[in-house]
Image (cartoon, helix red, strand yellow):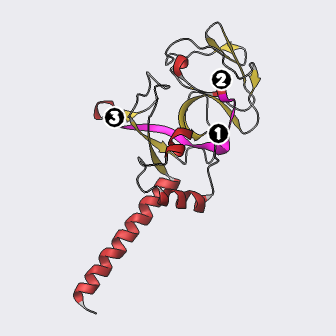
Amino acid sequence: MNPILKEILSWILLVAAALFISTLINSQVLSLATVKEVSMQDTLYENQTLVINRLAYRNRQPRTGDIIVFYQEREIGSFPQEFLRSLGNMNPFKRSENERRNRLVKRVIGTPGDVIDIADGHVYLNGEMLDEPYVKGLTFRDSFELPVTVGENQLFVMGDNREKSKDSRTFGLIDLSHVEGKVVFRLFPVNKFGRVK
């Protein structure tokens, strides 16, 4: 075989393997998200880049206090579906406008079986006032009727910036099948680099 052709083929195979591995990781293990709104301030700010652990909830459910990324209008698909979707979104920062609008970052407040209520500017979890040192502003009710018992395979979520967040108080409970993963790390900006709590 011609040495030049052999070199070209080896480069093509190398690029294809790298593309396959990066797509596999992005669709199944870790993915990136960019914060687009103020609803999670003062924990997360606009334009911060986050790492999402897509394996975090394979063997367990989210816990109260976890920060998650989920899709408001679509379920997370099967392995091949997510792999192909990830391949189509080679640049994780260039998702479609519709997908960006429906991909939200919020904090888990209630898990299956929990009773959630809001009174006097505070959240009550199973009758006890929830200690939320991360909250910005007061917490008020919205259009979703409370108190509510979180159903099986559902979550009640809210943004930390309670007066500026569209969350379960507005759109109701979310299905676990819509959860992409747990926010575990902040990559950017560099001065905020580190674990997210």
Closest to the observer, 177 or 100: 100
The chief SS type of the magenta part is: strand
Residue at (53% x, 45% y) in the render: 99
Quarter where residue 81 is shown:
bottom right
Residue extending furthest top? 120
Q: Marks 3 and 1: which is nearer the front?
A: 3
Residue extending furthest front? 97
Q: Secondary structure at mark 3?
A: loop
Quarter where residue 8 is shown:
bottom left
Q: CA distance from mark 2 to mark 1?
A: 21 Å
- Relative placement, left or right, of 36 versus 150 is left
Q: Which mark is residue 169?
A: 2
Image x and y of residue 185, in percent:
42, 38
Give the residue type at disc 2: Arg
Q: CA distance from mark 2 to mark 3?
A: 31 Å
Residue at (56% x, 56% y) in the render: 82
Q: Which residues are magenta?
A: 171-187
Q: Is residue 136 above or below residue 88?
A: above
Nearest to N terminus: mark 2 or mark 3: 2
Closest to the observer, 10 or 172: 172
- Relative placement, left or right, of 93 versus 66 is left
Q: Which mark is residue 71?
A: none
Image x and y of residue 42, in percent:
43, 21
Q: Marks 2 and 1: which is nearer the front?
A: 2
Nearest to N terminus: mark 3 or mark 1: 1
| Residue position marked by numbered label 1 in the rendering | 61
Residue at (51% x, 55% y) in the render: 27
Q: CA distance from mark 3 to mark 1?
A: 26 Å
